[in-house]
């Protein structure tokens, strides 16, 4: 979390330019995975413009990145409402494949990719935030505006669906 | 139990809950296999998803800079609005006239009391002395103007004694045509006599009567154009025609508005800085110097026939 303290005052102040430099990549990638590369730039830009407007209201109750993801998530939802939802397939980086764990070779990446695309938007949001963006249950709950238990439940159902698609068997 | 497997993998369970799950996994190979599969998918999603190429950072930074500029522009607008508010409030200025009694004031405001109200406007163009609020407003469009108001409601006065605020007149770029406004209400024994006296005063001041019209059944509005240098003498002569209703000066609305405008101006100056204000004023003054100034002031006067009772209560000058 990037916090820029205002010089000469005790109150915390935030420099939006510094925040954008620090968090733009993460926000943009989140937007790409939510709504695709074509709309991600607009969504990311809107996220930071919104943040610029309401920055004074940020009280540090959550981390800055969580707060930004929340704004980005709302912006992505707005774009989905306006232009429709198109599930964005995630892409796997072949250079990162396996990572030295031979068991990972047992998982068909293409099947997993297709299964991810078939998740409901709510389940997919939870997976993106927790697994890919690395947010905790609590942080994901803040971003999504739902209780932590709901995040836990969504992740459970999402992974059961993925497991069924990739390994077969019952959910 | 199965609902907690993902949370168990993520380490999101309490120690006691995790121990229960571990016991179950050791006793149940199917559950253990499920945990293994879930863990594999979780590891792959966490570690192997490709990072998309980041685009649009420069555009976002530019937009953020534009946002800052927009906020500054909005602030300047606030500054302008604050200045306008101050001007609008200052434009309606009070004249130090003798105040009548409360009864007289009430009468003057509501009933046909003998009163003269003076409200001067632009020197360039008279409102036509129509008594029409919109005509007055339109005439002063873009300048520091205030309507004469009906029955004294639109008039204000703080008793400052100034006929117009010269500094305020210098402040805006629209001042190439001077806009000088004053407000006056004087009770007179006779409207006709007051008209004659005012006409005489206009002649003495080398001004001219622009228009005369009836405001209502017993009140008449005069519009006169007076040289700037003669305004104070002229107003003094108008004041001598009678007494001014107190109600015309005791206008809490305008006092509040003035206080608010001052607060806004102070806040703006605090944030913008005196240098910026000075620069803006200098720019405006420079602009006004390019246009020849006119020196006449147009004044609107409303005359009403008197009631004997009201006049009896009015303090004589």
Image (cartoon, coloured by chain):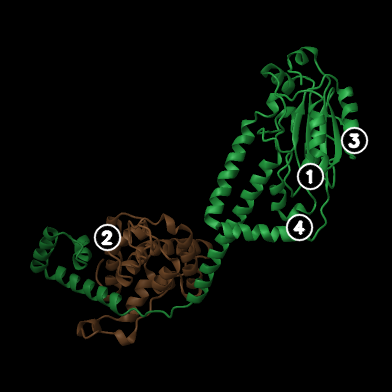
Chain colours: A brown, B green
Q: Give the CA separation, mark 4 to mark 2.
A: 70 Å
Give the Cα separation between the discs numbered 3 and 2: 92 Å
Tell me the element at label 1.
helix
Q: Are marks 1 and 3 in contact (CB under 8 Å)?
A: no
> In front: mark 3 or mark 4?
3
Of tags 1 and 3, the one toward the viewer is 3
Residue at numbered disc 3: B204
Q: Estimate the spatial distance between the alpha carbons at disc 4 and disc 1, rounded to whole Å.
A: 22 Å
User: Which numbered disc, 3 or 4, marks the residue that appears first in the sequence?
Assistant: 3
Q: Are marks 1 and 3 on the same chain?
A: yes
Confirm or deny contact between disc 3 and disc 4 (CB under 8 A): no
Q: SS of the residue at dot 2?
A: helix
Dot 4 alpha-carbon crowd within 10 angstroms: few under 14, some 14 to 19, many 20 or more: many
Depth check: B122 or B285 in front? B285
Q: Are marks 4 and 2 on the same chain?
A: no
Q: Which residue is mark 1?
A: B138
Which residue position holds label 2?
A: A152
Q: Viewer-nearest of labels 4 and 1?
A: 4
Q: Position of residue B268 (x, y in %)?
A: 56, 52
Alpha-carbon neighbours of circle 1 within 10 Å: few (<14), some, or many (≥20)?
few
């Amino acid at each position: 979390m990037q916090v820029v303290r205002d010089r000469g005052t005790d109150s915390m102040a935030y420099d939006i330019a510094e925040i954008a430099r620090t968090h733009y990549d993460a926000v943009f990638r989140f937007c790409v995975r939510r709504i695709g590369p074509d709309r991600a730039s607009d969504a990311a830009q809107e996220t930071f413009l919104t943040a610029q407007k309401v920055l004074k209201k940020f009280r540090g109750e959550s981390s800055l990145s969580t707060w930004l993801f929340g704004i980005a998530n709302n912006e992505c939802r707005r774009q989905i409402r306006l232009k429709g939802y198109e599930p964005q397939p995630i892409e796997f980086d072949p250079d990162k494949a396996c990572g030295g764990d031979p068991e990972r070779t047992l998982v068909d990446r293409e099947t997993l990719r297709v299964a991810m695309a078939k998740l409901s938007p709510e389940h997919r949001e939870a997976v993106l935030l927790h697994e890919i963006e690395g947010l905790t249950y609590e942080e994901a709950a803040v971003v999504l505006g739902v209780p932590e238990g709901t995040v836990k439940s969504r992740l459970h159902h999402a992974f059961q669906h993925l497991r069924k698609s990739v390994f077969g068997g019952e959910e | 139990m199965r609902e907690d497997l993902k949370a168990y993998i993520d380490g999101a369970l309490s120690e006691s809950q995790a121990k229960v799950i571990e016991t179950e996994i050791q006793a149940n190979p199917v559950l253990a296999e499920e945990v293994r599969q879930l863990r594999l998918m979780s590891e792959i999603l966490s570690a192997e998803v490709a990072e998309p190429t980041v685009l649009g950072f420069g555009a976002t930074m530019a937009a953020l800079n534009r946002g800052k500029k927009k906020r500054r522009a909005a602030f300047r607008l606030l500054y302008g609005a604050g200045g306008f508010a101050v001007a609008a409030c200052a434009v309606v200025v009070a004249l130090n006239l003798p105040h009548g009694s409360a009864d007289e004031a009430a009468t003057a405001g509501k009933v046909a009391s003998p009163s003269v109200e003076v409200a001067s406007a632009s020197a360039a163009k008279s409102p036509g002395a129509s008594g029409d609020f919109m005509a007055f407003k339109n005439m002063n469009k873009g300048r520091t103007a205030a309507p004469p108001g009906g029955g004294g409601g639109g008039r204000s006065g703080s008793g400052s004694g100034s006929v117009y605020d010269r500094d305020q007149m210098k402040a805006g770029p629209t001042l190439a045509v001077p806009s000088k406004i004053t407000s006056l209400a004087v009770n007179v024994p006779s409207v006709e006599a007051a008209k004659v006296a005012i006409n005489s005063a206009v002649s003495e001041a080398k001004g001219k009567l622009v228009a005369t019209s009836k405001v209502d059944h017993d009140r008449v509005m005069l519009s006169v154009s007076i040289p700037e240098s003669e305004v104070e003498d002229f107003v003094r002569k108008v004041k001598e025609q009678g007494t001014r209703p107190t109600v015309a000066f005791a206008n809490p609305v305008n006092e509040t508005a003035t206080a608010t405008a001052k607060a806004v101006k102070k806040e703006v100056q605090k944030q913008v800085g005196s240098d910026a204000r000075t620069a803006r004023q200098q720019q405006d003054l420079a602009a006004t110097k390019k246009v020849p100034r006119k020196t006449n002031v147009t004044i609107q006067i409303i005359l009403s026939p008197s009631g004997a009772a009201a006049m009896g209560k009015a303090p004589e000058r």
